[in-house]
Image (tube, rainbow, N blue to C red):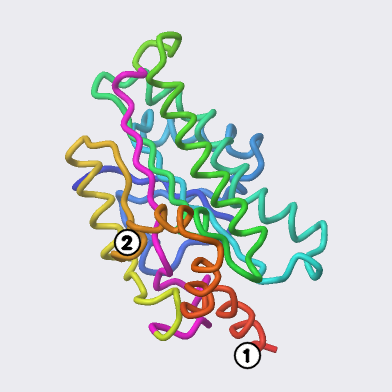
């Protein structure tokens, strides 16, 4: 990916260190709004040419219990965390399919899409939706009825634990389930490695995230004990209490 041109879609203005970099173009865009995405996509093609790599990374967190969530909270969560992926994939997929070298779709989900967590019902549900969407799209692209070029699309699913971002900065680690914290640069390097290698697959970091599927086959009593010991269902609630 060295030397590639990068289009960043975000609702906020770029940070100072990004502004002025010739290879990075920033576009103000609400990726949860399909009309906005389609409009920006046309401008990107004019400015940079057809994209061949799509990395979906938009995400927000409310950090509330089911009974404290408002309808607006829930709608906004799915607007950003899930609907945005449908919008960008449907918009940019034709360019990826048409590329002579193929294309890559990277879906940044979360290990919470497999485990769920207290105070994160909407967030966990949206991440579970991403995992299901990614898996289903991969199957569709592999089917006999897939459009021309589908065989050249690589699919990378990313299911990390807690990242070193502001989204979960208030959580205490590594004493609870969310530790150790994964550095964003470390995760980005692994994504770049897979894209450069032309690989499909899943990136799970840190180590414990690679074994969470086994949790579902354990007896309910054991699952409950592990959740209690890990602190997974209390961590976000404690973080929210600190802010208040």
The quadrant of the picture occupied by the N terminus is top left
**Residue depicted at 66% across the width and 50% down the height:** 78
State which region is magenta: 150-174
Looking at marks 1 and 2 on the same chain, the residue that comes earlier in the sequence is marked by 2
**Residue depicted at 44% across the width and 58% down the height:** 215
Q: Nearer the viewer, residue 34 or 236?
A: 236
The residue singled out by tag 2 in the image is 205
The residue singled out by tag 1 in the image is 242
How many discs appear? 2
Query: Circle 1 sits in a helix, a strand or a loop, which is it?
Result: helix
Q: Quadrant of residue 180?
A: bottom left
Q: Nearer the viewer, residue 95 or 48?
A: 95
Q: Position of residue 38 (x, y in %)?
A: 58, 32
The quadrant of the picture occupied by the C terminus is bottom right
What is the distance, in whole Å, between disc 1 and disc 2 at their CAs?
A: 27 Å
**Residue depicted at 63% across the width and 39% down the height:** 36
Q: Is residue 172 magenta?
A: yes
Residue 26 marker:
none
Q: Position of residue 91 (x, y in %)?
A: 53, 29
Q: Position of residue 225 (x, y in %)?
A: 51, 74
Answer few, some or many: residues within 10 Å of disc 1's Cα (few below 14, many 20 plus, some between 14 and 19): few
Q: Quadrant of residue 105?
A: top left
């Amino acid at each position: 990916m060295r030397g590639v041109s990068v289009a960043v879609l975000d609702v906020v203005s770029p940070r100072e260190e990004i502004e002025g970099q010739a290879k990075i173009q920033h576009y103000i865009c609400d990726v949860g709004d399909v009309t906005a995405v389609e409009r920006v996509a046309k401008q990107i093609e004019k400015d940079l040419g057809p994209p061949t790599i799509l990395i979906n990374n938009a995400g927000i967190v409310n950090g509330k219990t089911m009974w404290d969530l408002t309808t607006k909270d829930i709608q906004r969560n799915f607007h950003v965390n899930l609907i945005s992926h449908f919008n960008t994939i449907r918009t940019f997929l034709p360019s990826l399919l048409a590329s002579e070298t193929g294309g890559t779709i990277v879906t940044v989900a979360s290990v919470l899409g497999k485990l769920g967590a207290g105070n994160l019902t909407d967030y966990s549900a949206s991440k579970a939706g991403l995992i299901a969407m990614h898996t289903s799209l991969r199957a569709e692209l592999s089917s006999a009825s897939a459009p021309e070029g589908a065989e050249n699309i690589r699919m990378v699913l990313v299911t990390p634990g807690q990242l070193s971002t502001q989204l979960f900065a208030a959580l205490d680690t590594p004493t609870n389930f969310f530790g150790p914290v994964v550095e964003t640069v470390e995760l980005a390097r692994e994504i770049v490695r897979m894209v450069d290698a032309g690989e499909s697959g899943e990136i799970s970091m840190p180590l414990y995230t690679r074994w969470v599927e086994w949790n579902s086959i354990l007896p309910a009593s054991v699952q409950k004990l592990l959740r209690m010991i890990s602190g997974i269902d209390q961590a976000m609630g404690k973080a929210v209490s600190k802010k208040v």
